[in-house]
């Protein structure tokens, strides 16, 4: 009997440690709000990669994203955080970080130099407002963002997950006008 319990413990232990080695990692959350449902959908997409391009690179600060392949991998998933490295060609400096807390759902942009140190402009983003759905959320610039980048006071980031079509859309508006948009398709295994 003792051996049986030890054996079961080992099975449970190794199952709990499953992750990026090709085995399934399942995290279940109570989805009580559209933000929770959106986060649960992100978790469903963990370990998936999306590739695409900028479809609206008109704004000069985003021109460097206009002519390169954009790649997002939903790489790190826990019950409270999802990290999505976002590569623009060879530039691997960006990571989208979705955090779930009692306050709601938060998006921040983590920018790093190649040596891993933080950019001067990093960790900006905002909280999801109440207009979102299980597949689309709108994140309005938070106080930290406004303090860091005053002209971003009206920023709204929209992230859309088209689950059946296998699409990830990142859209930024400022002053109610389009500023940047990227459309990425899920890479098939």
Image (spheres, grey):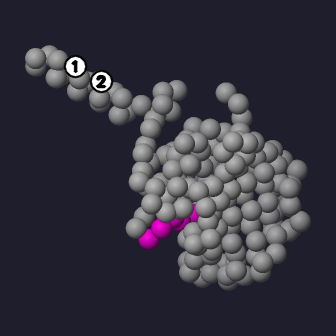
Look at 82% across and 70% down and name the residue there. 178
Which quadrant of the figure has residue 148? Answer: bottom right
Look at 78% across and 78% down and name the residue there. 176
Q: Quadrant of the N terminus?
A: top left
Using the image, determine if residue 189 lies above or below residue 33. above
Residue 63 in the image, given as x and y percentages of width and height: 86, 61
Q: How many marks?
A: 2
Query: Quick check: can you spot residue 126?
Result: no
Residue 31 in the image, given as x and y percentages of width and height: 46, 56
Task: Identify the element where label 2 is drawn.
Answer: helix
Task: Identify the element where label 1 is drawn.
Answer: helix
Residue 20 in the image, given as x and y percentages of width and height: 50, 33
Let me know if residue 55 is in the magenta part: no
Q: Quadrant of the C terminus?
A: top right
Using the image, determine if residue 16 lies above or below residue 27. above
- Which disc, if any, is residue 144? none
- To which residue does mark 2 refer? 11
Distance of label 2 from label 1 (alpha carbons) = 6 Å
Using the image, determine if residue 122 lies above or below residue 95. below
Q: Contact, CB < 8 Å: mark 2 with mark 1? A: yes
Residue 144 in the image, given as x and y percentages of width and height: 56, 77
Query: Quick check: can you spot residue 140?
Result: yes
Residue farthest toward the left in the current orientation of the protein? 1
- To which residue does mark 1 refer? 7
In magenta, the rendered stretch is 103-108
């Amino acid at each position: 009997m003792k051996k049986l319990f030890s054996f079961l413990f080992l099975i449970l232990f190794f199952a709990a440690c499953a992750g990026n080695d090709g085995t399934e990692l399942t995290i279940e959350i109570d989805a009580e709000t559209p933000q929770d449902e959106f986060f649960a959908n992100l978790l469903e997409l963990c370990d998936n990669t999306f590739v695409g391009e900028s479809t609206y690179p008109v704004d000069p600060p985003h021109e460097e994203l206009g002519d390169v392949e954009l790649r997002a991998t939903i790489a790190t998933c826990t019950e409270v955080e999802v990290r999505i490295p976002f590569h623009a060609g060879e530039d691997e400096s960006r990571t989208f970080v979705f955090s779930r807390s009692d306050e709601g759902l938060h998006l921040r942009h983590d920018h790093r130099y190649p040596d891993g140190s933080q950019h001067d402009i990093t960790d900006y983003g905002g909280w999801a407002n109440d207009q979102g759905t299980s597949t689309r959320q709108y994140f309005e610039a938070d106080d930290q963002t406004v303090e860091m980048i005053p002209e971003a006071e009206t920023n709204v980031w929209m992230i859309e997950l088209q689950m059946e079509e296998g699409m990830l859309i990142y859209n930024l508006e400022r002053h109610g006008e389009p500023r940047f948009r990227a459309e990425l398709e899920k890479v098939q295994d």
